[in-house]
Amino acid sequence: MKKLALALALTFAAFNLAAHDEHGKTCDIQKGKAISVSGSVSCKGDDCSFVTADAKTTYTVCEMSKADLPKLSASGKTVTAKGHLIKCEGKEKFLIDSAE
């Protein structure tokens, strides 16, 4: 009985580790270059992008951003966003910490 319980516990732990890899572990939110840029947020469904005011650079916005992305997108106004450029799923994304 103890062997069965141990096998179930190890299986459960393995599944949790695998699930964690798929949901955020590939995004390194602790590292990244801090930036502050002005521009606008545009969302199509859950996919959001940030276009700088000079329209020269477009960033894919990270889903884990703290800012209210749908609200910023709906306003259509130019905002100043502060956050970090991070690597997520092999791509560079903009993790927005705040936007005014």
Image (cartoon, rainbow, N blue to C red):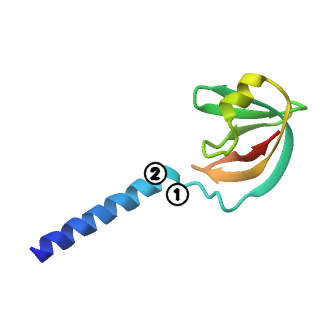
Q: Position of residue 17 (x, y in %)?
A: 39, 61
46 up-or-down from 26: above or below: above
Circles 1 and 2: CB atoms closer than 8 Å: yes
8 up-or-down from 65: above or below: below
What residue would you read off at disc 1? 25
Q: Position of residue 9 (x, y in %)?
A: 25, 68
Give the quarter of the image for residue 16.
bottom left
Q: Residue at x 73, y 51 (%)?
A: 85
Nearer to the camera, 89 or 28: 28
Q: Quadrant of the N terminus?
A: bottom left
Numbered disc 2: secondary structure: helix
Query: 9 left or right of 88?
Result: left
Nearer to the camera, 64 or 89: 64
Query: 64 left or right of 21?
Result: right
The disc placed on residue 89 is none
Q: Quadrant of the C terminus?
A: top right
Q: Position of residue 27 (x, y in %)?
A: 59, 54
Q: Residues within 10 Å of mark 1 (few under 14, many from 20)?
A: some
Give the quarter of the image for residue 28.
bottom right
Q: Residue at x 60, y 42 (%)?
A: 63
Q: Residues within 10 Å of mark 2 (few under 14, many from 20)?
A: few
Q: Position of residue 64 (x, y in %)?
A: 61, 46
Numbered disc 1: secondary structure: helix
User: What amino acid is labelled 1 in the image?
Assistant: Lys
- Give the residue at the far right of this rendering: 54
User: What amino acid is labelled 2 in the image?
Assistant: Glu
The disc placed on residue 22 is 2
